[in-house]
Amino acid sequence: MTMTDQSARTRIRSAVRWFDTRHRGPETWAYALNRITGLVLVAYLYIHLAVLSLLVRGPASYDTFVDVVRSPVFLSFDLVLIAGWLIHALNGLRLTVIGLGFGVRAQRMMLVGATVTGSVVLVVMGLLLFGG
Amino acid sequence: MTINATIEIFRCDPGGANGRFETYEVDVHDGATVLDAIEAVWAHHDRSLTFRHACHHASCGSCSVRINGRETLPCIADLGEALRARTPVRVEPLRNLPLAGDLVVDVDGAFERMLASEMTITRTAEDELPLDADGNGGVATRPTRVSDGLLRFNRFENCVECGICISACPTMATDQRFRGPAMLAAIARARAESTEPEVREHLLDLVDGEHGVWRCHSSWECTQRCPQGVMPAESIMQLRRDLVRRRSRRVPR
């Protein structure tokens, strides 16, 4: 069977395999997370642009919105967004380096390094968001 | 001493229809492999069970299946260990390859694509390489000269064509035209061996493009699941590095 033989439905069903991390190694977790965070970040970009467009209606509508997003619930969303950004950015750097053939044998170590760095930055960001 | 094992095997009609799991209980000797248990099912329960096997010592690569979700050669998979991980032990066919029946997949297509692209995975078949479009030698002037670095690249010669890397690769699930880990590792191996610049360049041309090395998204499952330590992911990255170097040489300075 070739790709051209596959129906759109089959291809979508096959794409679910990208996110099937059962019995797989940490690199596949990174593989799946990179896709999920990529989609989330693209969705956020559009939401962000829509929110910014409130400025067109004047300062009052924008300020009302900003008051809402300062609530702890929205700040939690911000933390999730930061986590997604960290995963995508740090793993993206790892993929760029090994994808060009450099440090290939250290790729697992890079993954560990990215996880540790991301976790530390996330904790700091959490403290900055909720601590002050 | 015998082990009483419960084993859950994927069964289907020829071509893959009516897929289901059927559970069997078998008595096998202590220290048995999962393949021993599959053979016991065939011998004592159901002679219609379709599965492939030959050498029983990880040399032929024909018996590859998924055991408890992981691609493995059942001929070297300890049954006791598999039972400790999951009871009943679940045995399924490989993924990303057309299902022929029960535990058998059709690997022909995958390896025919290699031939079509003027590349074979085994050195013994190199003499059968087709001529190029102009009827010239092309890659038929294939990489046969062994370089001094043979030992260093020896692992790429270990491929037993089991199809495990094809099944384990999540990218193969959505791009059937992706050359895949086994083939790309074979090309990297051939390139490492060759001392002829035209051959090396041609092999690099074969792997460039959207269904070549750039389609790999680094899940590293091929390297992790390969029973022979071929390390296809590493060879894919080496090919990318070679391509980047070649492109950077072409940038006008």
Image (cartoon, helix red, strand yellow):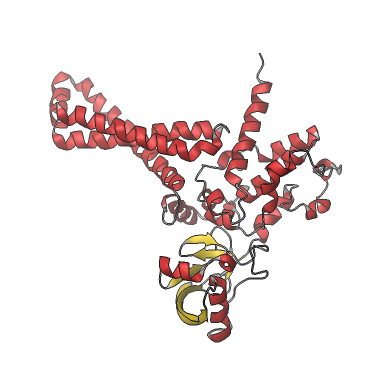
Q: Residue furthest front?
A: B1
Question: Where is residue A57 shown, x and y percent of the image?
Answer: 19, 22
Seen as rendered, the residue at the extreme bottom is B44
Instruction: Using residue B235 as the reference point, say whether residue A24 is left or right of it.
Output: left
Q: Is residue B175 above or below residue B25?
A: above
> x, y percentage for residue A114?
40, 34
Quadrant including the C terminus of chain B: top right
User: Residue A34 at what x, y percent from top left?
Assistant: 41, 40
Q: Which residue is most to the top?
A: B253
Instruction: Give the image location of residue A14, x and y in percent.
Output: 48, 54
Viewer can see residue A46: no
Q: Residue at x 54, y 33 (%)?
A: A103
Query: Observer-nearest residue: B229 or B217?
Result: B229
Residue A17 visible here: yes
Query: Is residue B38 rendered to the left or right of residue B187?
Result: left
Q: Quadrant of residue A117?
A: top left
Left or right of B93, for residue B247: right
Residue at x-position 51% and y-position 64%: B66
Of residues A3 and B41, the one drawn nearer to the viewer in this rendering: B41
On screen, B207 above or below B92? above
* Residue drawn at point x = 46 percent, y = 78 percent: B5
Number of marks? 0
Residue positioned 20% across, 37% down in the render: A76
- Residue A7, compared with residue B62, is above or below; it is above
